[in-house]
Amino acid sequence: MLFRTGLNLKKFNALQAADDGATVDLIHFLESLSCSESGRVSRCASGKRGSMTVEAALVFPAFLLTVTAFVYLLAMTQLKTEVGRSLTDSGKQLAEIAEYADTAGSIESSAAVILYGKQELKEYLDGRVATAILQDGVGGISTLGSSWEEDTGLITLQASCQAVFPPGITWFHPIRIMQKRVVRGWIGFDGREESGDSEKEEVVYVTDYGSVYHKDLSCRYLKLSIRQSDLSKVSDLRNESGGKYYPCEKCWEKGADRVFLTEDGTRYHQSLNCSALIRGIHTVLLSETLLPPCSVCGG
């Protein structure tokens, strides 16, 4: 009797466990039906998570693109400003030396303006953040179109480059940026200014680093004839006195391939901005200078 009762208890427990499993399966089935009904889809928790994921996938890229475009426009504006500022500074420097150069209007002078503008742009923009949007870096800036006109005395500096968006992606159509500056070469002071009815006193010309005074502003020692050459050819070149050229102590650094030199000088230079190539000429009264006269024009 006890044995039969124990056996029946085991069967009951087994049937109860089977019934519980069926109930769980039935509940899962009914929940799946409630999620599939058209009017109750929003009640499904998994549907809510999928909706938020899709919205984020659509909104975030649009937001990121907007922010990137804004930053790019700021960088492009900054780049245009810096290129224009560099051209303005270069134009002022060229205007100062225009009076003392005797090759204005020639092919050599226009080529020198192009090289000068490009060199100044590279030095000015080197390391600046705005150059990151340039297609070929600072080396991709072109100064073709710059010129020096003899008739009008106008010096034109022009720079153009390609900016890409976003930076580093070359397949996107680049945007062309161009800046242009026009300056007039300085004509200098001729020394004929009068002060009232007082007796005229002779005016002479001296340079910042000169050791003599000059009576004629067109003296060949005041008018520099700057030309460009390859470094490999400098050893074979001679100045007008037959002397050799040596590296300038002020501006020369190893690594340059192109150099600048003058007919009457003894040094070759790496930069047109070297103080030895820029003659700062001043007018003084002859009675106030203690310098000896120039051997060419001071006699």
Image (tube, rainbow, N blue to C red):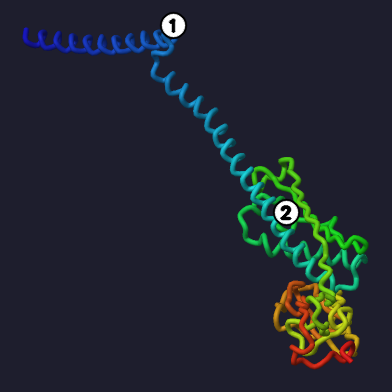
Q: Is residue 34 above or below residue 218?
A: above
Q: Is residue 204 above or below residue 50?
A: below
The answer to which of 52 and 148 lies nearer the viewer is 148
The residue that disc 2 covers is 136
The residue that disc 1 covers is 39
Q: State which tag comes first along the sequence, 1 or 2.
A: 1
Circle 2: residue type: Asp
Q: Is residue 246 above or below residue 190?
A: below
Q: Are there few (<14), some (14-19), or many (20+) residues within 10 Å of tag 1?
A: few
Left or right: residue 51 versus residue 262 is left
Q: Are there few (<14), some (14-19), or many (20+) residues within 10 Å of tag 2?
A: some
Q: Residue at x 81, y 65 (%)?
A: 115
Residue 286 position within the rendered picture, expressed as x and y whole percent measured from the top left:
79, 87
Q: Residue at x 78, y 69 (%)?
A: 96
Circle 1: residue type: Gly
- Residue 277 placement: quadrant: bottom right
Q: Residue at x 89, y 92 (%)?
A: 299
Residue 197 position within the rendered picture, expressed as x and y whole percent measured from the top left:
81, 78
The answer to which of 195 and 51 lies nearer the viewer is 195
Q: Residue at x 77, y 91 (%)?
A: 291
SS assignment at label 2: loop
Residue 245 position within the rendered picture, expressed as x and y whole percent measured from the top left:
82, 85
